[in-house]
């Protein structure tokens, strides 16, 4: 659905109102309050005073004959009418903005901001490579980073709340584009004092060992899903949700952590040992996803290219990758 048809749809919902009385800025105010849930924060977002924002909201309430937002202890709660209006108005405003933006993007001019939702893995591995690159070529560009939740990716990209999602991306509808950045593989990470350190693990040792598992809040661990296909399992004694929790935890206990290789190499120094997985697990594709509607947008295309450049050299063919684990390593450069 194009932005004009989306805007007409939004207006159709409020068909009892004379369209000539609707100021486009009122819809921008509505969209900001929907996003921020507080009038004061919405005013800051739009560079308006709070009295001006409140006045605009009152005009909208009068025009639409609905309270739209109810004041609660948690902020402004949208009414049923506001929830109905929200998605089409957000999409229409986003596409109007894109239509009016310049055809060329000059990153050295002005302070453009990009919003990315990154997996924990991408935050550790990709972000430290992207930031120095942007600092060299576009120091005025700002990034806003949000944690990646697979269940929210479609809504975030559709609404424009985020420009890109980076990480292990689930299958998305055809209205989204994706580009594989590199492949990664799982390895077994443990401290060098672990009884199993020093040589590749056998399947029997892997199954019998105590494991620390990285398990996302909203889904089953990818490792456990792949092990199940091999009719195998592991003995998990501790679950964490973030990669950053792993090194200090396995320093203090004889635990094995199944980690993506690039993350393991980021943490691995003389005190850690990396062993190949004793199961032939398929490599994981680290990808970039965005809305197809923004594919030809100049700023979007520019940052996509920078992400590809930042990931150059990450990930290797499986045989070469495996030949590098299980050996003494210094900390991998960022």
Image (spheres, rainbow, N blue to C red):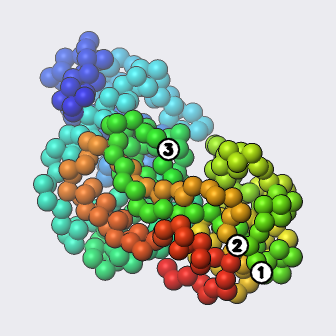
Of labels 2 and 3, the one closer to you: 2
Q: Is residue 181 above or below residue 291?
A: below
Work out whether mark 1 precedes mark 3 in sequence or the reverse, and give the earlier one: 3
- Can the viewer see residue 39 in this picture? no
Kindly identify which numbered label has been placed on residue 63: none
- Can the viewer see residue 232 in this picture? yes
Task: Give the residue pinned by disc 3.
Answer: 170
Q: Is residue 13 above or below residue 139?
A: above
Of labels 1 and 3, the one closer to you: 1
Q: Secondary structure at mark 2?
A: strand
Assess whether mark 3 and mark 2 are in contact (beta carbons under 8 angstroms): no
Q: Observer-nearest residue: 235 or 98?
A: 235
Looking at the rendering, which quadrant does residue 121 occupy?
A: bottom right
Looking at the rendering, which quadrant does residue 213 occupy?
A: bottom right
Label 2 to label 3, Cα distance in Å?
Answer: 28 Å
Kindly identify which numbered label has been placed on residue 198: 1
Residue 251 image point, x, y percent: 79, 76
User: Which residue is at a point 84% across and 54% down the rendered structure image?
Assistant: 235
Residue 309 image point, x, y percent: 34, 70
Q: Residues within 10 Å of mark 3 (few under 14, many from 20)?
A: few
**Which image quadrant: the N terminus?**
top left
User: Which residue is at a point 26% across and 42% down the rendered structure image?
Assistant: 293
Task: Give the residue pinned by disc 2.
Answer: 275
Label 1 to label 3, Cα distance in Å?
Answer: 36 Å
**Left or right relative to 315: residue 108:** left
Residue 4 image point, x, y percent: 18, 29
């Amino acid at each position: 659905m194009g932005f004009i048809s989306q805007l007409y749809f939004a207006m159709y919902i409020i068909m009892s109102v004379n369209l000539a009385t609707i100021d486009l800025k009122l819809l921008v105010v509505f969209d900001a309050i929907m996003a921020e849930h507080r009038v004061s924060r919405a005013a800051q977002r739009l560079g308006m005073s709070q009295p001006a924002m409140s006045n605009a909201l009152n005009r909208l309430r009068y025009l639409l004959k609905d309270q739209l937002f109810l004041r609660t202890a948690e902020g402004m709660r949208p009414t049923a009418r506001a929830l109905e209006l929200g998605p089409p108005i957000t999409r229409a405003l986003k596409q109007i903005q894109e239509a009016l933006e310049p055809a060329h993007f000059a990153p050295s001019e002005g302070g453009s901001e990009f919003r990315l939702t990154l997996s924990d893995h991408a935050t550790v591995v990709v972000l430290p490579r992207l930031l120095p690159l942007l600092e060299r070529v576009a120091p005025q560009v700002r990034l806003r980073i949000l944690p990646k939740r697979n269940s929210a990716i479609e809504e975030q990209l559709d609404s424009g709340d985020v420009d890109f999602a980076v990480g292990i991306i689930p299958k998305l509808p055809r209205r989204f584009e994706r580009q594989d950045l590199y492949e990664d593989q799982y390895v077994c990470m443990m401290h060098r004092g672990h009884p199993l350190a020093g040589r590749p693990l056998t399947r029997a040792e892997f199954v019998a060992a105590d494991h620390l598992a990285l398990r996302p809040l909203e889904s089953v661990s990818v490792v456990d899903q792949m092990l199940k296909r091999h009719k195998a399992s592991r003995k998990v004694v501790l679950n964490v949700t973030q990669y950053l929790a792993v090194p200090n935890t396995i320093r203090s206990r004889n635990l094995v952590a199944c980690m993506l290789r690039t993350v393991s190499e980021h943490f691995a120094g003389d005190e850690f040992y990396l062993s190949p997985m004793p199961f032939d697990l398929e490599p994981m594709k680290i990808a970039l996803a965005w809305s197809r509607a923004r594919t030809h947008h100049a700023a979007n295309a520019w940052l996509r290219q920078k992400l590809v450049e930042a990931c150059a050299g990450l990930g290797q063919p499986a045989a070469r990758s495996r030949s590098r684990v299980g050996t003494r390593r210094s900390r991998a450069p960022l």
